[in-house]
Amino acid sequence: MARRSLASRYLVDTYMNDDDDIDEEYEESLLVQIEEERLAKKSSKRGRRGSIMGHNIVERDPIEGHERLYRDYFANPPKYGARLFRRRFRMKQALFLRIHDAVVAHDNYFVQRRNAAGRLGLSSLQKIGESTAIESLKRFVVAVVEVFGDEYLRSPNSDDLTRLLAKGEERGFPGMLGSIDCMHWTWKNCPTAWHGMFIGHIHEPTIILEAVASYDLWIWHAFFGLPGSLNDINVLDRSFVFSELAEGRAPPISYEVNGRSYDMGYYLADGIYPSWATLVKTIPAPQGRNCCITYTI
């Protein structure tokens, strides 16, 4: 028998008996098959590259998901009422729909579209309500800042201060700019190694939010992210709520109480806050004439 090439000997050893004959055409076809198998194995090791043989496809049916979400919370009447809506979305339905409509009008990413196969994708309610992906969440946050930043995420200007002072005086608090307080937000997925830093009197990991709100719940100051082991005083020491006042850049304020003029507003606070001129605390146990004073908040 003539001396075989290296490829022929490999084919004989792998696919045939040593006594079988092999012609050049068959040898070439086997080599092509071997090369295709090699490339397929190499491609599968790189991760997903388009359709892969044996890959399981999950039919998620976004249309059915949208219809179920709409029936449960947004139909008239919905399957689950206002209390359960607030429990799931952490806000009233009217506020949710206001944010939803503004975000959809601002960024067409949240508009329901068809994919390359012509199938409808996720609806705007699913993208906003379900937080389906990191990309959706990032774009939602950017849209909220761009849409509502000029109204909410800023310090009050002169017109705002005039309105706040007028409303505070009408309610029995001349010179009041708002109420300041801290709240703890539970951090369910806090890393175990960080528990000691983020656990305080709540006895579970929390993140602190310091906020200043006006009578109509206009939150114009928010300081978020400090660990739950701190208290209101520690947070105030790190906060920038009084930065403009300390640097002399705060808008001018003028009001009178009992015939005396003042040029610095104040915030209502609870008992843990320090005794500063800009903080007015409640009276925990009013005596005498103080017990008869009634304020309208």
Image (cartoon, grey):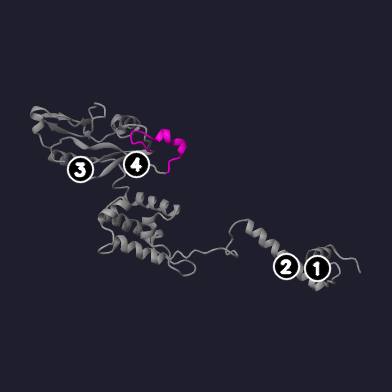
- Return the x and y of residue 187 as percentages of the image width and height: 39, 42
**10 Å neighbourhood of mark 4: few (<14), some, or many (≥20)?**
some
The reply, left or right, for residue 108 in relation to residue 282 is right
- Can you identify the residue that label 2 sits on? 33
The residue drawn where x is 35% and y is 64% is 68
Mark 2–mark 1 Cα distance, whole angstroms, equals: 15 Å
Image position of 247 with respect to 134: above or below? above
Q: Are marks 2 and 1 in contact (CB under 8 Å)?
A: no
| Magenta stretch contains residue 201 | yes
Q: Which mark's residue is nearer the viewer, 2 or 3?
A: 2
- Residue sitting at x 78%, y 70%: 28
Type of amino acid under label 2: Gln
Residue 283 is tagged as none
Looking at the image, is mark 3 or mark 1 nearer the viewer?
1
N-term-proximal mark, 4 vs 3: 4
- Chain-order first, disc 4 or disc 1: 1
Q: Nearer the viewer, mark 4 or mark 1?
A: 1
Callout 4 amino acid: Trp
Which quadrant holds residue 133?
bottom left
The C terminus appears in which quarter of the rendering?
top left
